[in-house]
Image: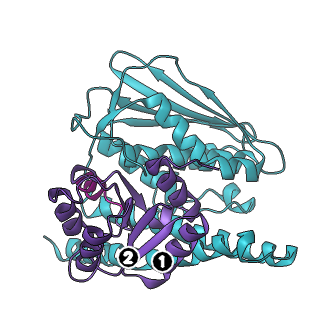
Chain colours: A purple, B cyan
Amino acid sequence: MKKILIVEDEIPLLKALADRLTREGFSTLEAKDGLVGLNVALEEHPDLILLDIIMPGMDGMEMLEKLKVNPLSKNIPVILLSNLGDTSKILEGIEAGAESYLIKANVKLEDVVKIVKEKLGVNIA
Amino acid sequence: MTKEKEIDKAKSEFVSLASHQLRTPLTAINWYIEMLQDKDVGVLNDKQKEYFLEIYKGSRRMVDLLNDLLNVSRLETGRLKIEPVPTDLKAFIQEVCKELQPLVLEMGCHLLFKLPEKLPEVNVDQVLLRQVISNLLTNAIQYSSVGKAGQVIVSLAVSPKEYTISVKDNGIGIPKEVQGRIFEKFFRADNAHEIMVDGNGLGLYLVKQIIDAFGGSIRLDSEVGKGSIFYVTISLSGMKAKVGQKGLEK
C-alpha cells in the first residue's frame, strides 16, 4: 500500500485529503506544520508528500528545501498544494524541486487523486 | 506617491489579502460537496443532488470572482510579473480547452479547433495566457449557447514574427455602440444582462490588461445576433523565457 504524507495546517482540508486518499486505497500520514512534517518524512519514508506552503512555524518552502538536501528524503516526490497563485511562487516551488504545484481553490479532490496516481505510476481508473 | 494612489494601493492590497483568506474556506466547501457526491459515503436523492449542485455552482462562482479580483489587484499594484517558459502552444491551448470541458458539456456547446500541425516552441507565461484563453472561451461558450447549441472555434495562426489566437462564436454578439467599452472594469453590455448569463465584468478587463502587459494587441469583430470573434496577437520575440523549467500544472 502506497504511503502519502499530507502536511497541511487547515484541519478541514487535511481531513478531506486524508479521507479521499484513504478511500482510493492509500495509507496516509498527517502533519500540521513543516517541522512535524519533516520528521515524519524522515522516519516513515512516504512514497509521496502533499505539502501546503503557508503554515505556522516551518512553512512548506522551508520543509521542501530541507527535504531536497537530505539524501534520505531528496527523492520523495513532493506536490505543492497552496492557495498562493502568483507565477513567481509557482516557479519558486518547481525550482526548489517540487514535482507539481496545484492551487487548492482551483482543483477538485479528484484532480489531486489523479495527479498523485500519475506521479506514483498507479493505475488510473 | 499621491494620496489617491496610496489609497488605491491600500485598497488593492486589502482585496488581495481578503481574497487569499477567502480561498481556504471556499476550498473546504467545494471539496466536501465533492465528497458528499461520492457513492462511498452514501447515496443522495435527486433533490439533494440538485441542491448540492446549486451550492457548488455558487461556490465556484465565488472562487472565479476571487481569482479575478486577485489578478486585478496584482495588475493594479504592479505585482504582476511575466514569467515565460518554453511552451508547445498547440498542446497548451488544447489543455486549457480540456479544462473547460465541464462547461462545454453543461451548455451543450460544440467546441472546434483550427490548429496548425507543427509549431515551434513559444515562450509564454502559462498562468497568464491560460487566463486570457480561458476568459475568452468561457464568454464564447456561455453567450453562444443560449437557447441553442452554440459553436465555438478556437484558431491559431503563426507568422514569422507573431502568433494570433482567435476565438469565434455564433452567440448574441456585442452591439456596435458598446464595443469600445467592453474592456472596461465591471462593464457588461445590456444584452449580456438580459440573457441572465453569469459574469462579473472583470473577465475582458483582465484579458486586455494581460495582453497589454505582454505588449500584444486584442481586436474584436462582432455583430448582434451573429456572433463575435476576438483576435489576440502576441509577438514571438516579446517574451524571453526562463530556460530549463518544467511546465506548470495550473
Q: Which amino acid, by three-letter code, is at mark 2?
A: Glu
Please indicate, yes or no, whether residue B15 appears anywhere in the rendered image. Answer: yes
Label 1: chain letter: A
**Residue A8 bears which disc, if any?**
2
Q: Position of residue A63 (x, y in %)?
A: 22, 68
Mark 1, residue position: A13
* Magenta span of residues: A85-93
Q: Residue at x 57, y 78 (%)?
A: B29
Q: Is residue A120 left or right of residue A60?
A: right
Q: Position of residue B26 (x, y in %)?
A: 52, 76
Q: Is residue B30 magenta?
A: no
Q: Nearer the viewer, residue B246 or A47?
A: A47
Q: Which amino acid, by three-letter code, is at mark 1?
A: Leu
Q: Is residue A91 magenta?
A: yes
Q: Give above or below for B17 relative to B126.
A: below
**Residue A119 bears which disc, if any?**
none
Instruction: Give the Cα separation between the discs numbered 2 and 1.
Output: 7 Å
Q: Residue at x 73, y 75 (%)?
A: B52
Q: Give above or below for B116 relative to B129.
A: above
Q: What SS does tag 1 mark?
A: helix
Q: Nearer the viewer, residue B141 or A15?
A: A15
Q: Give above or below for B164 relative to B179.
A: above
